[in-house]
Image: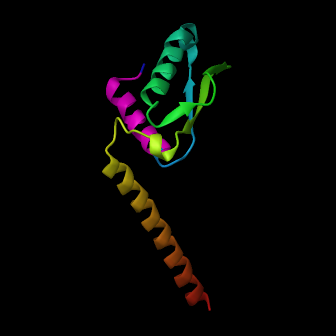
Amino acid sequence: RIEEHDYVTKLRRSEKFLHQGNKLKITLMFRGREMEHIDLGMNLVKQAIKDLSGVGKADDTPKLSGRFIIVNLSPLPQNQRVLRYNSEEEAEVEDTEEESDEDFSEENAEGAEAISS
């Protein structure tokens, strides 16, 4: 039920997230008649785990819990991470953008303290 472009977009975002050293939780929700085709959903989640194997590994096998298939992924050690869907520069650029956002919020907090004094 997901198109190839949408799937690759999700993989790219997930890969960046794992490359930064964060854990990732993959959740697939079934609606209505989709419950009849749990095997297709399980195959999709297993394919995602396989596609992200360069930057992370599954903590456990995917489990069906009610209407959801859930699996957690942990990042590999820094020296073992290999990007497949992103370049190193893209992953690093996003890191620096987040740091500059934090600096901006700290500056605003200092300015607010000066105004209130």
Whether residue 67 is visible to the viewer of this picture, yes or no, is: no
The answer to whether 6 is drawn above or below residue 66 in the figure is: below
Q: Is residue 15 magenta?
A: yes
Relative side of 88 to 32, left or right: left
The total number of labels drawn is: 0
Relative side of 73 to 89, left or right: right
Whether residue 14 is visible to the viewer of this picture, yes or no, is: yes
Specify how the rendered protein is coloured. Answer: rainbow
Taking depth in this image into account, of 35 and 48 the one nearest to the observer is 48
The x, y position of residue 98, in whole percent, is 45, 60
Query: Where the N terminus falls, by quadrant?
Result: top left
Taking depth in this image into account, of 8 and 20 the one nearest to the observer is 20
Quadrant hosting residue 83: top left
Taking depth in this image into account, of 5 and 16 the one nearest to the observer is 16
Quadrant hosting residue 65: top right
Q: Residue furthest front?
A: 79
Query: Where the C terminus falls, by quadrant?
Result: bottom right
Residue drawn 63% across the image and 26% down it:
60
The x, y position of residue 22, in whole percent, is 55, 46
Q: Which residues are magenta?
A: 2-18
Relative side of 64 to 51, left or right: right
Relative side of 47 to 9, left or right: right
The x, y position of residue 80, in whole percent, is 46, 40
Q: Is residue 7 magenta?
A: yes
Taking depth in this image into account, of 45 and 60 the one nearest to the observer is 60
Residue drawn 56% across the image and 19% down it:
31
